[in-house]
């Protein structure tokens, strides 16, 4: 897939220090997302969607290392600390343990995290706080973590993971998008009805990508209530036909 920098409606900022971070003006209370790594290409990436204006604020990539999402109440400090630890070679379990501890964050029970790392391919990690809003949970498999809250059902998580697994052998960006579409097809964010979400993103970085120039970057910011499904808009921006 060639480098992509298409946006819907307006551009956004995509950087943080030596690692790639998607930031927003306000916290993004995210709903469902997937983080994954590809050991054959050394790519790291994520896709997510939510019934909030800017879900892209949840993700941070450390090219050549791994990826983290910080959602639900979306603790920006946890996201920044997590990607720093990834860049230093930290394991997903150690990272999740550090940022979901009360000594780091007294609101940790309201947070949700997913982390995958190339050097710990078989050991992704996730955390779903006891105070996150139902339906909430996460699923893990080698190289991938799927997490969500305020979902229509557990089927959103299962469908997302199943679609990613079934697309083994395809480029990472395609697998992530297929997974997100599968979650949307099962209802996505329960707050958005048939629209399933208001914003979505897809981002993938190769091991040698500059922090500001990941090879794939698509961000669909907030769509109006009852407007287009941002996951469909993400497919249109990515190309390759619809899977709706």
Image (cartoon, grey):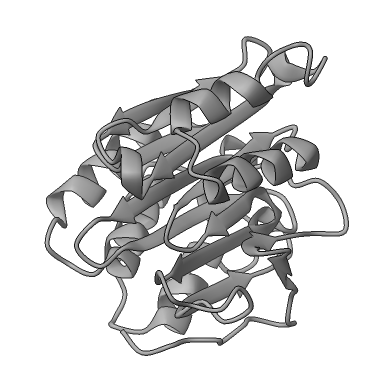
In terms of image quadrants, where is residue 73? top right
How many numbered markers are drawn?
0
Q: Is residue 232 above or below residue 78?
A: below
Nearest the viewer among 82 and 32 is 82
Q: Is residue 125 above or below residue 77?
A: above
In terms of image quadrants, where is residue 244? bottom left
Residue at x-position 25% and y-position 67%: 41
Q: Position of residue 146 (x, y in %)?
A: 40, 37
Q: Is residue 63 left or right of residue 105?
A: left
Residue at x-position 73% and y-position 82%: 11
Nearest the viewer among 80 and 84 is 84
Nearest the viewer among 174 and 105 is 105
Q: Position of residue 47 (x, y in %)?
A: 47, 57
Q: Position of residue 35 (x, y in %)?
A: 43, 47
Residue 244 in sight here: no
Residue at x-position 65% and y-position 59%: 56
Q: Is residue 226 left or right of residue 206?
A: right
Q: Is residue 145 above or below residue 84?
A: above
Q: Quadrant of the N terminus?
A: bottom left
Q: Is residue 96 above or below residue 18?
A: above
Q: Check the image and name the residue furthest to the front.
A: 88
Q: Position of residue 6 (x, y in %)?
A: 56, 87
Residue 204 in sight here: yes
């Amino acid at each position: 897939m060639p480098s992509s920098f298409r946006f819907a409606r307006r551009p956004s900022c995509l950087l943080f220090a030596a690692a790639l971070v998607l930031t927003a003006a306000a916290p993004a209370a995210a709903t469902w997302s997937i983080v994954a790594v590809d050991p054959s290409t050394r790519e790291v990436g994520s896709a997510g969607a939510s019934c909030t204006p800017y879900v892209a604020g949840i993700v941070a990539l450390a090219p050549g290392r791994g990826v983290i999402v910080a959602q639900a109440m979306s603790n920006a400090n946890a996201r920044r600390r997590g990607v720093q630890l990834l860049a230093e070679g930290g394991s997903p379990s150690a990272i999740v343990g550090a940022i979901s501890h009360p000594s780091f964050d007294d609101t940790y029970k309201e947070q949700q995290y997913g982390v995958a790392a190339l050097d710990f391919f078989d050991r992704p990690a996730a955390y779903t706080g006891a105070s996150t809003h139902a339906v909430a949970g996460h699923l893990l498999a080698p190289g991938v973590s799927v997490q969500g809250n305020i979902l229509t059902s557990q089927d959103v998580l299962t469908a997302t993971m199943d679609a990613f697994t079934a697309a083994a052998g395809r480029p990472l960006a395609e697998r992530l998008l297929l997974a997100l579409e599968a979650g949307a097809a099962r209802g996505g964010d329960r707050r958005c009805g048939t629209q399933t979400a208001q914003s979505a993103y897809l981002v993938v970085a190769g091991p040698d990508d500059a922090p500001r120039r990941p090879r794939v970057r698509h961000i669909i910011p907030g769509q109006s209530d009852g407007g287009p499904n941002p996951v469909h808009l993400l497919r249109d921006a990515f190309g390759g036909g619809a899977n709706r």
